[in-house]
Image: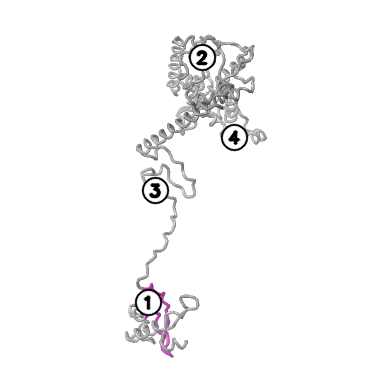
Amino acid sequence: MTSDAAATGVRRGLPREPGGEPWPPASGAASGARSASDSGVRSGIGSEAPSRPDPVHASESAGASAVTAPAEPADGAIGATSVPVPPAEAPGALAHPAPRPPLTVARTVWPGAAARRSATRAVPGAKPRAAALGDYSPVQLLGSTAVLGVFALALVGIVVLLARFVLAIGPGREFLAAFPGEYHLPASAPVGLPAWLNWSHFLNSFFLLLIIRTGWQVRREKRPSAFWSPRNNKKRRISLALWFHQALDILWMANGVVFVVLLFVTGQWMRIVPTSWEVFPNALSAALQYASLDWPTENGWVNYNSLQQLSYFAITFVAAPLAIVSGVRLSGVWPKNAEKLNRLYPVEWARKVHFPTMLFFVAFIIVHVALVLATGALRNLNHMYAARGAVDPEAFVSDPTGLLIFAASLVVMAAAWVAARPAVLVPIARLFGEVKQR
């Protein structure tokens, strides 16, 4: 025992800070010793266990908070022990609560109305689920739609003003005079649209509509209502929606093959395949005219503008082959055991190509139909559906024949959309295999 401990009868420990005085201070230790002796605490055989000094007296005498250890037992005492007591906080000190321990399970509830509940039970370690429309209230959806609509209108207004500004300045007018939006086709290019092209155009629209519908159904369907199997391989089973999707693909490809063959046989290919490098500056000119809301004034019966030509070329010779190649890789036609071929063309690549290609078709159809109706609907519909037109762009601008045929085609498409149900598809699918329903 040190001299201080001998004088006070209290064991002193390590300092509270480097180089400081041993704890508790000498004054506090002396006060603690006096408190212990005043309370009559004794150590020895048969005596009571040592009691803890009163921290209040120790605090008052030292001017700071301190809880002292029990008094040192008298010399020769047997069985006395000293129990260290942790010091208390100083009076007036701010209490800092311990940091909250992290959650041991994944969070399933968040504040706010946007996530009142979790659609699926959270699994520890699982990836977070992407937000769905069902996670938001109707007010939030309406507000988001309004904000996006205002933003879209503002963006369209900026584009229109910018395009008008470019075409109003001197260089813009010179560019428009040099490249009006179309270039002259070769002298051997045919004039007009034949009836076979009108029929092919309608069948292409018809099949594409149903292909997009069934493709989206396959993508979203969780529990198919019916399954189809070929008669020669009953182990292979696909959903009825996938069977219909692939059947439509075959019909669409057959129509496309006939279209491309006739395109090159009749010379119509020169209308949609660029034959001059002037197609690019003219396409830019046509895009500026569309953006400025001053539509190009070409006559589609004779020639398409360059932006149309590039779009039709991309649809026919880029997007369609990509859809076919990726679709074949995803279908049952692809050999499953061809390891080398599967390594060269992984199925993941096909999935990453197939769905974006479908979105491209959807965007093209929306823009194509909008421009057909906005740039002379009666004249354009006569070209596309009735094979009626003339070199004079003002001819057939009031003839409703094309419009009536177009309306009839919409009725047929709507009827096919409604009829594409198991009650109608099951008897047809059974002609080519076996169908099992739930």
Q: Are marks 4 and 2 in contact (CB under 8 Å)?
A: no
Image quadrant assignment for residue 302: top right
Residue 88 in sight: yes
Q: Under tag 2, what secondary structure?
A: helix
Residue 240 in sight: no
Q: Is residue 40 magenta?
A: no
Viewer-closest of 45 and 149: 149
Q: What is the magenta segment's predominant secondary structure? A: loop
Q: Is residue 69 magenta?
A: yes
User: Label 3 is placed on what type of residue?
Assistant: Trp
- Residue 404 screen position, x and y as percent: 44, 12
Q: Under tag 4, what secondary structure?
A: helix
Of the numbered discs 1 and 2, the one sitting upstream in the chain is 1
User: Label 2 is placed on what type of residue?
Assistant: Met
Q: CA distance from mark 4 to mark 3?
A: 37 Å
What span is colored magenta in the figure?
Answer: 62-90
Viewer-closest of 5 and 158: 158
User: Label 4 is placed on what type of residue?
Assistant: Trp
Q: CA distance from mark 3 to mark 2?
A: 55 Å
